[in-house]
Amino acid sequence: MTRGLRAAVLGCLLSGAVILLAGGRGWARVSYPGKARVVSGHALAGTLVPWGLVALAGVVAIAATRRWGRVPVGVALAASGAAVVTLTVRVLADLDVRAYRATRTGGAQVLTAYPVHPTVWPYLVVAAGVVLAACGVLVAVRGPRWAALGSRYDVPADRPRSDADLWAAQDRGEDPTEP
């Protein structure tokens, strides 16, 4: 396995795992009097699970495709990483309003009275999105030069394929199971 291929596969695995894990963790803590409330990434962003699954599916897609088939896979991974970064940055830019909506509290007085503190999880999702986008670019640019899955279990072209061909080969005294 080449270094680039290994880096792309590990990057997709790591970014997918971080996106899926961090989406369910608390992204913001609202300091209400008496008790602080923690708001999860799913409540704030909502669509992180599909992007994490796309990253994990990228591992299989990189391995299953050959040559120029990896270019669309890389483009899709890069676009997915960009979507994760864009979504998370939008959430962070509007964190106060989104956190208050998620805790079912509204009004202008609430926005100024109770502070919202972001946690480390949305920043990890941004980093995972950047890694996923970088892996996508790597796959799109360098992927066509990487080795493909072996053809060890493929049916050779010169072997009979139909039942009639198998019987005809046996009638000629050939063993159709031998290479």
Image: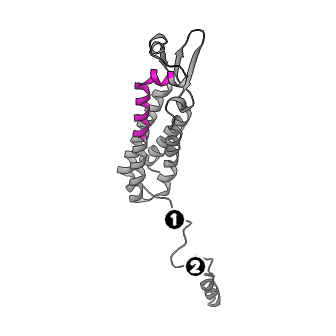
Mark 1 Cα-neighbour bin, 10 Å: few <14, some 14–19, many ≥20: few
Q: Mark 1 = which residue?
A: 151
97, 17: nearer the viewer: 97
Magenta range is: 81-100
In the rendered image, the vertical position of residue 87 relative to residue 58, given as above or below: above
In the drawing, what numbered circle is on residue 62? none
Q: Position of residue 92 (x, y in %)?
A: 43, 26
Q: Give the residue furthest to the left.
A: 141
- Spot the residue most to the front: 107
Instruction: Name the amino acid type tagged 2.
Output: Arg
Label 2 or label 1, whichever lies nearer to me, is 2
Q: Give SS at disc 2.
A: loop
| Classed neighbour count for the residue bearing mark 2: other residues with Cα under 10 Å, few (<14), some (14–19), many (≥20) | few
Q: Label 2 to label 1, Cα distance in Å? A: 17 Å
x 47%, y 28%: residue: 122
Q: Is residue 89 magenta?
A: yes
Q: Which of 57 and 24 is in front in this view?
A: 24
Tell whether 108 sits left or right of 155.
left
Mark 2 and mark 1 lie on one chain; the one further toward the N terminus is: 1
Q: How far from the left and from the top, in percent, is residue 13?
A: 52, 42
Q: Which quarter shows the C terminus? A: bottom right
Inspect this view and state whether residue 5 appears.
yes
Q: Could you tell me the amino acid type at mark 1?
A: Ser
Whether residue 119 is visible here, answered yes or no, is no
Badge 2 is on which residue?
161
Q: Which of 31 and 60 is in front in this view?
A: 31
